[in-house]
Image (cartoon, coloured by chain):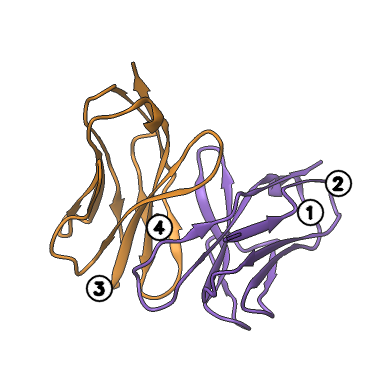
């Protein structure tokens, strides 16, 4: 069974607009963490943001925020004021308990000038 | 500060050949992971290790073996390479202590099996 589901293979957003990338997850472990990573065309994996399952507030890091809805098991990434440099693949990931980290299939975001 | 280093960066193999990918980290991390990335498939976990001398299977372990003899190194082996193992391989490491904490990635190793 897929642990992390990203249903948007590709998305377009106008420069300076906000965009939401969807991520749903599946786990029975009460202790877990959710991550978002960015992979530009150069290939490196860049950490963006983290949300713990016990965190009461949504995580924010600059223009990135994570919309965490625990009951719905969703952890959507919101990018505000999109920039051309935001064009990349975005991966949602989950760490269950203390061990393995699994990734979704990714969303390719393209920012249009 | 090197972080996570993967060697080699590129390799071409013939079907049936064997090879080892080396991942080295200098951050004293307990956890280490090997992923493969294929178009449309995201990153799939091959094997991982939660400490020196320990390894565990991930989502797609068949055809691969791993070893973690030293804390800083995590080796991924292909005993008899197959074309289906053509992929980009990423190593990552992270701290122990619960679900928090980001993974630090290497630059990736592109493997082609002919």
Tag 1 secondary structure: loop
Q: Are marks 4 and 3 on the same chain?
A: yes
Callout 1: chain: B
Tell me the tag on residue B81: 1
Marks 2 and 3: in contact by CB < 8 Å?
no
Between the C-alphas of marks 4 and 1, the distance is 27 Å
Q: Residues within 10 Å of mark 4 (few under 14, many from 20)?
A: few
Q: Name the residue under label 4.
A: A1
Q: Which residue is drawn at 66% across and 76% down?
A: B68
Q: Residue B14 carries which label?
A: 2
The chain assigned the colour orange in the figure is A
Q: Tell me the SS state at disc 4.
A: loop
Tell me how far mark 1 sits from mark 2, CA to CA: 7 Å
Give the farthest residue toward the front.
B1
The answer to which of marks 1 and 2 sits earlier in the sequence is 2
Q: How far apart are marks 4 and 2 (CA)?
A: 33 Å
Residue drawn at 22 percent across, 25 percent down: A17
- Element under disc 3: loop
Q: Compute the Cα span from label 4 to label 3.
A: 18 Å
Looking at the picture, do discs 1 and 2 lie on one chain? Answer: yes
Residue at 60 percent of width and 49 percent of height: B107
Q: Do the residues labelled 1 and 2 touch (CB within 8 Å)?
A: yes
Instruction: Say which residue label 3 marks.
Output: A30
In screen coordinates, is B56 left or right of B83? Answer: left
Tell me, what hue is chain B?
Answer: purple
């Amino acid at each position: 069974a897929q642990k992390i589901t990203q249903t948007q293979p590709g998305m377009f957003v106008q420069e300076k607009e906000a965009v939401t990338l969807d991520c749903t997850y599946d786990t029975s472990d009460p202790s877990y963490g959710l991550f978002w990573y960015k992979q530009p065309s150069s290939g490196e994996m860049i950490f963006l943001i983290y949300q713990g399952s016990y965190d009461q507030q949504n995580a924010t890091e600059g223009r990135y925020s994570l919309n965490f809805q625990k009951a719905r098991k969703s952890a959507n990434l919101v990018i505000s004021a999109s920039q051309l440099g935001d064009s990349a693949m975005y991966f949602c990931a989950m760490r269950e308990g203390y061990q393995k980290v699994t990734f979704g299939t990714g969303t390719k975001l393209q920012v249009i000038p | 500060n090197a972080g996570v280093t993967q060697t080699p960066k590129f390799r071409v193999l013939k079907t049936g050949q064997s090879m080892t990918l080396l991942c080295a980290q200098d951050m004293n991390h307990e956890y280490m992971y090997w992923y493969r990335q294929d178009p449309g498939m995201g990153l799939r976990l091959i094997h991982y290790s939660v400490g020196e001398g320990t390894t565990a299977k991930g989502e797609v372990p068949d055809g691969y073996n791993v070893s973690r003899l030293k804390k800083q190194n995590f080796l991924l082996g292909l005993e008899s390479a197959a074309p289906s193992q053509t992929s980009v391989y990423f190593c990552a490491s992270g701290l122990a202590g619960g679900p928090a904490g980001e993974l630090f990635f290497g630059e990736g190793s592109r493997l082609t099996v002919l």
